[in-house]
Image: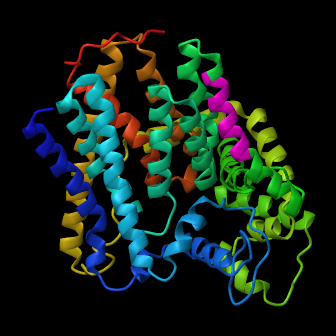
Amino acid sequence: MKLSRRVQLAAVVVLAFILRAIWLLRPGSDWAVGADSHLYLALARGLKAGCGVAPYIERCGPPELMRTPGYPVFLFPFLAHLRLAIAIQASLGALVCLWAASFTGRRAGPVAGILAAAIVAVDVPTILNSKEFITEALFQAVLTPAIFAALEGSPFVAGAALGIAALIRPVALVLVPLVAMPFIAKRSWRGALAALSAAILIIAAWAVRNERVAGVFTLTVEGPMNLYLYTAPAVIARHDRVPLESVQLSFAHDAAVLVPAREIPGDAEFGQLYGSDPTISALENDPALSNFMLSRSVSVILAHPIDFAINTLAGFIRLAIEPYRLQTGWQGLITNPRALASIQFAATAFQGVVLAVMWIGVFCAVWRRPRDWEQWILLGAALMLILTASIYTDAISMRFRSPAIPFLAVLAGIGWFPSSVKRPQAKL
């Protein structure tokens, strides 16, 4: 790579760090605590207090089955210096840009790599995710090299990284079969077995822990809960043409009936970490309720597949192309309505341009080399991540798109700047 290209790439990586770390200009760390952050911080304090993976509020709470341990373990060393955790998350975002550029550059040259890095660097939901104590920044930084390592022929690294990613956000489960595909395409059966084994062993270890502490062999009870809270009610509401809120209340009542409420002194403190939804309270009292939630949700989906497909398609389109709408300006510091409206409009327009550049580049890459299995694996990883989040209807957030951005950015770079690097085409 020429010196000028290296300087350009360095500028993009530095920009990525600045955009993610600029929030540290504000004092303190309260601005980094979102709705989900309280539970992650309580779990990290639980680790420090010797509670294991359980929340800690003046005493140890019950073993945690809803959130996986990856992010609390990350937060644990920074409990006394929470601002440092935000700085580390900003650094991880810059590192993902560098990985995307390096991976793309080896396949399509330095200009394509710089474009890939730039798309990741300026992605608004990814930037905003990095400034809060939530899983997305860490998840993206672990999942991205997992898929890249699989395509580069490192089965153990790929499988282990994917397994760890699943302990940060369970959505990585859908990519377990995909991590073996590069080795299957090369007929490297040992590589495929090594990648799958490493991922499955890590995931299974946590499922065994959950079975031991609560009698439920699962990575998390949150997946069945989300299907029960959001997906199944939306399917019934669409099919029966009834208000979604009415169906959700009915589902909540059914769950509460199965698990009588148990008031234990001090439980209210921990209950606040999970919100006030009665369905979540019922699941806290009896984690085995997740089996009922899963079976009922699946039965609803199978009974009304067309309505489920329509809801999922609508969610998929939203996640694929809808810009993230800023809610506040600089965490509420910008109070002038006109200034805030101008910032929101500019941010939405900018995101629209970036998303258009990205998806046009993805289309061009696949169109030019339709038999390149590496590109299909990258696209498959991105689409599976988006599709998995698309089923949650009104609970969809544009931040769920962030893990897919590095893979789409690589394809966009290759699509806009076709390969200037001579290499054999990986064909199906």
- Residue segment shown in magenta: 191-203
Foreground residue among 403 and 336: 403
Residue at the spot x=74%, y=67% of the render? 64
Estimate the x, y position of residue 15 in percent, counting from the top left. 20, 56
Identify the image quadrant of residue 426. top left
Image height check: is 56 above or below 321? below
Query: Is residue 147 inside the magenta stretch?
Result: no
Residue at the spot x=76%, y=49% of the render? 205
Estimate the x, y position of residue 132 in percent, counting from the top left. 43, 69
Image height check: is 122 above or below 303? below
Estimate the x, y position of residue 235 in percent, counting from the top left. 68, 43
Residue at the spot x=11%, y=45% of the render? 7
Image height check: is 174 above or below 141? above
Q: Is residue 219 left or right of residue 358?
A: right
Query: Is residue 200 inside the magenta stretch?
Result: yes
Identify the image quadrant of residue 345. bottom left
Q: Is residue 96 left or right of residue 149?
A: left
Instruction: Let me know if residue 131 appears in the view.
Output: no
> Most prominent secondary structure in the magenta stretch?
helix
Estimate the x, y position of residue 391 in percent, counting from the top left. 60, 43
Residue extending farthest to the left is 4
Instruction: Let me know if residue 405 appears in the view.
Output: yes
Identify the image quadrant of residue 74. bottom right
